[in-house]
Amino acid sequence: MLLRLDPAVHDALAAWAAAELRSTNAQIEFLLRRALFDAGRLPTTVRPIPKRGRPPKSGTGDGGPAPTPDTGPD
């Protein structure tokens, strides 16, 4: 998808995103979702934004089970 923005608007979004440790794309999605929610127009089928940070490892490399998001590593 292509989104055309005024360069000054893009620069402001990029700076805001950096301050919140998000990518510019994630910041735009966050703001659009919030605006849709506030306007009562966010579809109920929209999945939540994934949590920040690295995704959990698919394996530990030692053949043991990977830690679950609920328990984390020991």
Image: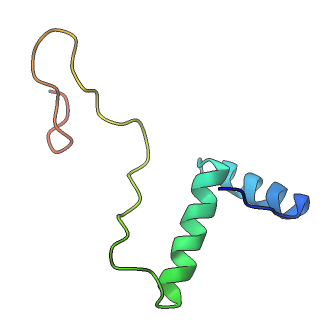
Residue at 21% across / 42% down in the picture?
A: 69
In the picture as drawn, the residue positioned furthest to the top comes out as: 62
The quadrant in which the C terminus is found is top left
Residue at 52% across / 72% down in the picture?
A: 33
The quadrant in which the N terminus is found is bottom right
Q: For this view, does 50 lie left or right of residue 8?
A: left
Residue at 59% across / 49% down in the picture?
A: 22
Identify whether 27 is placed above or below 54: below
Identify whether 72 is placed above or below 17: above
Residue 17 % position (x, y): 66, 54
Residue 54 % position (x, y): 40, 35
Q: Dividing the picture into quarters, in which one does residue 42 lie?
A: bottom left
Q: Dividing the picture into quarters, in which one does residue 44 lie?
A: bottom left
Residue 27 % position (x, y): 61, 58
In the picture as drawn, the residue positioned furthest to the left comes out as: 64
Q: For this view, does 45 lie left or right of residue 31?
A: left
Residue 72 % position (x, y): 19, 35
Number of marks: 0
Residue at 25% across / 26% down in the picture?
A: 58
Identify whether 61 is placed above or below 8: above
Q: For this view, does 36 lie left or right of residue 72?
A: right
In the picture as drawn, the residue positioned furthest to the front comes out as: 1
- Seen from the viewer's position, the closer of residues 73 and 68 is 68
Identify whether 45 is placed above or below 63: below
